[in-house]
Image (cartoon, rainbow, N blue to C red):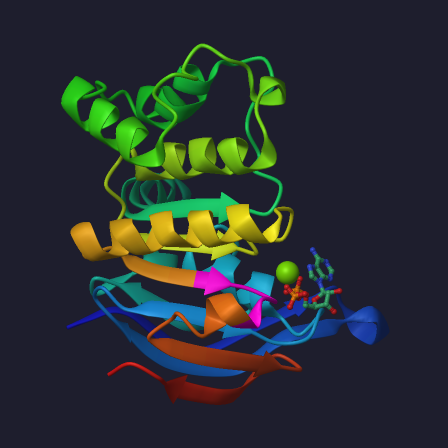
Amino acid sequence: MDILKIEHLSKVYGQGNTAIKALDDVSFSVKKGEFIAIIGPSGSGKSTLLHLLGGVDKPTSGKVFINDTNIYLLNETQLAIFRRRQIGLIYQFFNLIPVLTVKENITLPLLLDNQKVNPNHFQEIVEKLGIENRLNHLPNQLSGGQQQRVSIGRAMMNHPAIMLADEPTGNLDSKNSQEIIQLLKMFNNIYKQTLIVITHDERIALQADRIITIKDGKIASDEVIRP
Ligand code: ADP
Ligand code: MG
């Protein structure tokens, strides 16, 4: 089953002679549970693509279907709700809120969505991430690897169908990088969560089921390495 279908996606930033075509007619499909690595030179359009897949930004043209919903036909409110419930996002610099504790950071998206925190699910996720004894700490009291675990916990709270990670290990040493990828792969396995990771790290890319290379806003190659 295709969980994600991208059709002729293009994104132009700016107008006139300063316009930049960041994404140029990109099409591909993603199966439920697939783990895809996106690689390519800096400035090639990887982050732009990820943001469009997650409904964070709007394309100039083209369509994105998530579970058969044409997401850019939704209005702003519908899209925000859809995004909160279907998409988990992880960034290089964690994007945690500095004045909130670990527990508050993790549960914030649910509270913003007027949902109750399921204590069993919360406990299961923080234990799997190994941060159960850091719940009352503030982000700046944690190492980079721990902060990234918290941001994964936050992304996991609403059982997203798709996890999107933009260079999640770009700010971590190699031991923590490997651990973070192992955690993302574990959730990909246990919950059949579709996982799309932008990375510069070849060792990480080679753990994926499929590697898509982006160059100049286009797909330069799309290789399945684990069918
Ligand atoms: P990557 O993630 O592969 O490094 P990006 O998707 O961030 O590439 O950027 C692709 C191109 O689009 C680059 O030329 C970048 O400068 C440009 N770009 C990205 N975001 C914006 C923006 N908000 N406004 C203008 N140009 C942008
Ligand atoms: Mg980028």
Give the percent coordinates (x, y) of residue 99.
Answer: 58, 13
- Which residue is at 52% across, 83% downward? 25
**Residue 44 appearing in the image:** yes
Residue nearest the viewer, comparing 204 with 139? 204
Residue 198 belongs to magenta span: yes
* Residue 186 located left or right of residue 131: left
Give the percent coordinates (x, y) of residue 176.
Answer: 52, 46
Ligand 1 is found in which quarter of the picture? bottom right
- Which residue is at 76% across, 71% downward? 19
Q: Quadrant of residue 152?
A: top left
Q: Residue furthest top?
A: 136
Residue 110 belongs to magenta span: no
**Residue 59 appearing in the image:** no
Give the percent coordinates (x, y) of residue 158.
Answer: 26, 36
* Residue 120 located left or right of residue 157: left
Magenta-drawn segment: 197-202
Q: Is residue 124 above or below residue 83?
A: above
Give the percent coordinates (x, y) of residue 3.
Answer: 23, 66
- Which residue is at 71% across, 69% downward? 42
Residue nearest the viewer, comparing 42 with 145? 145
Q: Quadrant of residue 33?
A: bottom left
- Which residue is at 47% across, 54% downward? 178
